[in-house]
């Protein structure tokens, strides 16, 4: 027989409203010193936890780049770490059907930056915990809650900062639940429960080209923009070969068995298509991927600049992280100088700049 508290327990009761409030706090991460930071969102989360008697600790790697750690329950057993991030990738309002930071509900769906990555998960965690506390349902083991800054730029100002400067807050956790990590899908009527077993790496590569500056009306055979544009085109259109990692070999072998065939590099893409919408993400781990993401130069429309630069993101499969960025530099080597930026492992999927995503108005 359920107690009165258990009967009143509605773990999903606040998810939508909590998520809407988080979306309305702009925590865009531009990957540099610009951006609003995560302080306001962390304070809001701390307030929600305080309402149900859970004390939080706010920690900053630098002003505004705020992460939160809290502990719920004191039962026996090893603590479980439940973590999410508070920052989001930027959103240009002109690209959206609805304002990206308004948290509007339209056609039965919540719209806004963060509804997929990952203020939705943050809201789910908070809704469940607030409901359980109010219903008098403590966890069977201690739960450490962690909401971090800077995940969208590699985590150096968030998760890495916590591990390096405050390891005591999470050192006793023996298991963790966070972003992605696995999901379920159906293939030919069979339900699959996918579990993350490897991560793609990420490398930012900055290319620079030099040429002869001059007036835009004159002939110029040494145009830095033209030279760099050619390098960008070669990198962006490069056809990367399929390379099956051990994890993907196991996954595709299971699908091939259902399809009555054997998994090989030649039919890997066809097997991934069996996953339907999930193939957009899984297809990105069959090979290395590189996408140009930024391009800038010049100071006036009728002046040819002497220098131009752009940045691309190279997301590599776990076994080929070095070869991916090196090959990208080789693609550009005939005309440009390339300089790798710091490489990091970033989440359980391709990087934010390269992974397959829903249309901009939904993510």
Image: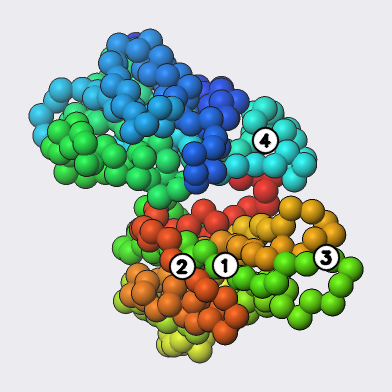
- Write down the residue under mark 3: 215
- Write down the residue under mark 1: 208
Crowding around mark 1 (Cα neighbors within 10 Å: few <14, some 14 to 19, many 20+) is some
The reply to whether dot 1 and dot 4 touch (C-beta < 8 Å) is no
Give coordinates of residue 245: x percent, y percent: 36, 77
Specify the quadrant that holds the C terminus: top right
Task: Look at the numbered disc 3 and give the secondary structure of its residue.
Answer: strand
Distance from the alpha carbon under mark 1 to that under mark 3:
21 Å
The reply to whether dot 2 and dot 1 touch (C-beta < 8 Å) is yes
Give coordinates of residue 124: x percent, y percent: 45, 32
Crowding around mark 4 (Cα neighbors within 10 Å: few <14, some 14 to 19, many 20+) is many
Q: Earlier in the sequence, mark 2 or mark 1?
A: 1
Of circles 4 and 2, which is in front? 2
Nearer to us in this view, 184 or 120:
120
- Write down the residue under mark 4: 100
- In the image, taking residue 124 as reference, residue 354 lies left or right, namely right
- Write down the residue under mark 2: 339
């Amino acid at each position: 027989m359920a107690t009165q508290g258990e009967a009143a327990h509605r773990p999903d009761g606040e998810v939508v409203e909590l998520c809407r409030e988080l979306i309305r706090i702009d925590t865009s991460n531009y990957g540099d010193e610009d951006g609003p930071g995560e302080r306001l969102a962390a304070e809001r989360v701390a307030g929600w936890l305080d309402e149900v008697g859970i004390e939080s600790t706010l920690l900053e790697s630098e002003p505004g780049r705020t992460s939160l750690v809290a502990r719920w329950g004191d039962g026996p057993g090893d603590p479980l770490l439940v973590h999410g991030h508070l920052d989001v990738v930027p959103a240009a309002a002109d690209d959206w059907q609805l304002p990206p930071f308004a948290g509007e509900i339209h056609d039965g769906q919540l719209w806004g930056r963060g509804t997929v990555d990952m203020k939705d998960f943050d809201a789910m965690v908070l809704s469940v915990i607030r409901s359980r506390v109010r219903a008098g349902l403590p966890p069977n083991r201690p739960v450490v809650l962690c909401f971090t800054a800077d995940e969208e730029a590699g985590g150096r100002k968030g998760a890495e900062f916590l591990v390096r400067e405050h390891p005591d807050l999470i050192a006793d956790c023996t298991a963790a639940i966070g972003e992605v990590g696995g999901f379920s899908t159906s293939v030919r009527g069979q339900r699959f429960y996918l579990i993350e077993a490897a991560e793609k790496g990420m490398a930012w590569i900055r290319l620079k080209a030099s040429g002869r500056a001059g007036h835009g009306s004159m002939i110029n055979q040494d145009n830095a923009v033209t030279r760099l544009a050619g390098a960008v085109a070669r990198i962006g259109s490069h056809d990367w070969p399929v390379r099956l990692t051990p994890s993907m070999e196991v996954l595709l072998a299971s699908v091939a068995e259902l399809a009555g065939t054997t998994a090989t590099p030649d039919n890997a893409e066809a097997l991934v298509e069996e996953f339907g919408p999930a193939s957009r993400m899984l297809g990105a781990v069959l090979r290395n991927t590189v996408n140009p993401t930024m391009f800038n130069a010049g100071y006036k429309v009728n002046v040819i600049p002497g220098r131009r630069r752009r940045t691309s993101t190279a997301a590599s499969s776990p076994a080929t992280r070095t070869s991916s960025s090196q090959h990208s530099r080789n693609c550009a080597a005939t005309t440009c100088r390339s300089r790798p930026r710091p490489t990091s492992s970033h989440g359980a999927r391709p990087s934010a700049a390269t992974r397959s995503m829903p249309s901009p108005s939904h993510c």
